[in-house]
Image: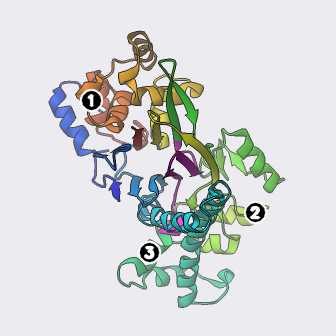
């Protein structure tokens, strides 16, 4: 199993273009991670992650080789990296255990059994994050949440123990959050792909048809630009004026499904207690307002959507966090064209000259040639951000920020799978 993350600090804009390309490459490398894993004769997996203008990279990717194939995961954390880190190390392994059991028990009915297995595993993993926190709190004081006082919260967080049993990381794993994008490839006589998703990380299947890349989305995007998700929320929470504010669920977060985010999933009495804990992303002023209104959690779902696809030799899979989409949109790529651009950046060595130039014109800079970068995922990130444009490269690598309002860039992580 290989995990990609960068956990260092970067200065947080002002920048100049007097740096050499070598200097900027060095700075880019210090803020990124990349690897290539040739798992067997049939698959090669490229991973890369780039830290944006934050104190830490909240994205995590993971690839696990299994007895039946392999599993890829992309986890885009929000509020911090505790949930994405924990899921990248643990949820992937739990999925493997459960899928292995399904294959052993139901080898002829995988199409029915695997979706059920993935939904159950992810829902239970999320439930365990919340249950572990609640059990820890009740071990200190079993009284009702409505009776917890401001003094009880620091008393709980002060119950220091060793490692994973410390109250603070347990609370943060429940109260922070992460998207989930898990791809399970079962390699038998034919290759089959199942994709489970929570949130707005995304995946694409690229396939060459008539000498051109075709692009197939591999998952739904669970955000408030998705009309189906908006309708689902409105049907589950009728008559709540603050349900969707500025494309954010309860005015707080731009996605509708995720791991963690306990404060948006638990009853208001517990949410009020959690809001008083140091580091909780939602303050007491917000939960006090919720308490005066109609409030019917959970607002964030932990039920993933599942999709299944047959794969062929020569296919390419691209999985990424939403930072890549944000960067492409910023550079003028239309929302409906983002998937095609992502696949084309990954498979640019097969593009004809005219198509390549048209994509460069769309994005506004020339691309680094394929032969200059071995890691396809790293190439996608570099060409999405700056390509051969030194001014854009300086902006992405050398800027220092006076405040977060100076310049906003989300972390971006990419995993590319070549099916050989």
Q: Which residue is mark 2?
A: 295
The reply to whether residue 284 is in sight is no
Work out whether 319 lies above or below 165: above
In screen coordinates, is 359 left or right of 394? right
Secondary structure of the residue carrying numbered label 1: helix
Mark before the other along the chain sequence, 3 or 1: 3
Magenta part mainly helix, strand or loop? strand
Secondary structure of the residue carrying numbered label 2: loop
In screen coordinates, is 265 left or right of 152? right
Mark before the other along the chain sequence, 2 or 3: 3
- Residue depicted at x 27% and y 45%: 31
3D distance between C-alphas at marks 3 and 1: 38 Å
- Binning the other alpha carbons within 10 Å of mark 1 as few (below 14), some (14 to 19) or many (20 upward) gives many
**338 and 159: which is toward the camera:** 338
Q: Which residues are magenta?
A: 173-202
* Residue 394 disc label: 1
- Residue depicted at x 30% and y 33%: 14
3D distance between C-alphas at marks 1 and 2: 46 Å
- Residue depicted at x 49% and y 54%: 78
- Binning the other alpha carbons within 10 Å of mark 2 as few (below 14), some (14 to 19) or many (20 upward) gives some
Work out whether 71 lies above or below 260: above
Q: Which residue is mark 3?
A: 168
* Residue 286 disc label: none
The answer to whether residue 10 is magenta is no
Viewport quadrant of the N terminus:
bottom left
- Residue depicted at x 40% and y 31%: 346
The answer to whether residue 188 is magenta is yes
Residue 267 position in % (x across, y down): 70, 71
Viewport quadrant of the C terminus:
top left
Secondary structure of the residue carrying numbered label 3: helix
Q: Residue furthest front?
A: 189
Quarter location, residue 286:
bottom right
């Amino acid at each position: 199993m290989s995990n990609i993350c960068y956990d260092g600090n970067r200065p947080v804009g002002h920048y100049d273009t007097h740096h050499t390309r070598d200097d900027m490459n060095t700075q880019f490398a210090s803020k990124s991670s990349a690897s290539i894993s040739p798992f067997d004769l049939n698959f090669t997996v490229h991973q890369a992650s780039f830290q944006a203008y934050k104190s830490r990279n909240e994205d995590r990717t993971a690839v696990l080789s299994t007895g039946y194939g392999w599993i890829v995961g992309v986890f885009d954390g929000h509020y911090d990296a505790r949930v994405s880190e924990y899921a990248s190390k643990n949820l992937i392994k739990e999925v493997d255990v459960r899928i292995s059991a399904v294959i052993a028990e139901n080898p002829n009915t995988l199409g029915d059994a695997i979706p059920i297995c993935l939904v159950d595993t992810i829902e239970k993993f999320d439930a365990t994050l919340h249950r572990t926190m609640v059990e820890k709190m009740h071990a200190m004081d079993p009284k009702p949440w409505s009776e917890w006082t401001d003094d009880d919260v620091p008393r709980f967080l002060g119950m220091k123990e060793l490692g994973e049993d410390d109250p603070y990381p347990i609370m943060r794993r429940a109260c922070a959050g992460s998207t989930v994008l898990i791809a399970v490839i079962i390699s038998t006589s034919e290759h089959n792909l199942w994709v489970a998703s929570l949130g707005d990380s995304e995946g694409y299947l690229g396939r060459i048809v008539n000498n051109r890349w075709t692009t197939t989305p591999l998952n739904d995007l669970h955000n408030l630009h998705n009309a189906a998700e908006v309708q689902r929320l409105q049907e589950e929470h009728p008559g709540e004026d603050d349900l969707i504010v500025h494309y954010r669920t309860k005015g707080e977060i731009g996605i509708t499904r995720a791991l963690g985010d306990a404060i948006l999933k638990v009853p208001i009495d517990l949410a009020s207690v959690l809001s008083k804990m140091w580091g909780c992303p939602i303050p007491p002023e917000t939960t006090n307002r919720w308490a005066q209104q109609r409030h019917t959690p959970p607002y964030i779902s932990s039920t993933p959507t599942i999709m299944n696809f047959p794969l062929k030799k020569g296919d390419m899979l691209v999985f990424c966090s939403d930072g890549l989409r944000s960067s492409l949109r910023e550079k003028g790529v239309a929302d409906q064209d983002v998937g095609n651009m992502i696949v084309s950046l990954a498979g640019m060595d097969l593009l004809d000259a005219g198509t390549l130039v048209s994509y460069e014109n769309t994005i506004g800079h020339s691309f680094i040639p394929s032969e200059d970068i071995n890691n396809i995922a790293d190439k996608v990130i570099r060409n999405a951000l700056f390509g051969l444009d030194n001014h854009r490269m300086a902006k992405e690598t050398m800027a220092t920020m006076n405040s977060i309002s100076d310049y906003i860039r989300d972390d971006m992580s990419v995993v590319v799978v070549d099916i050989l």
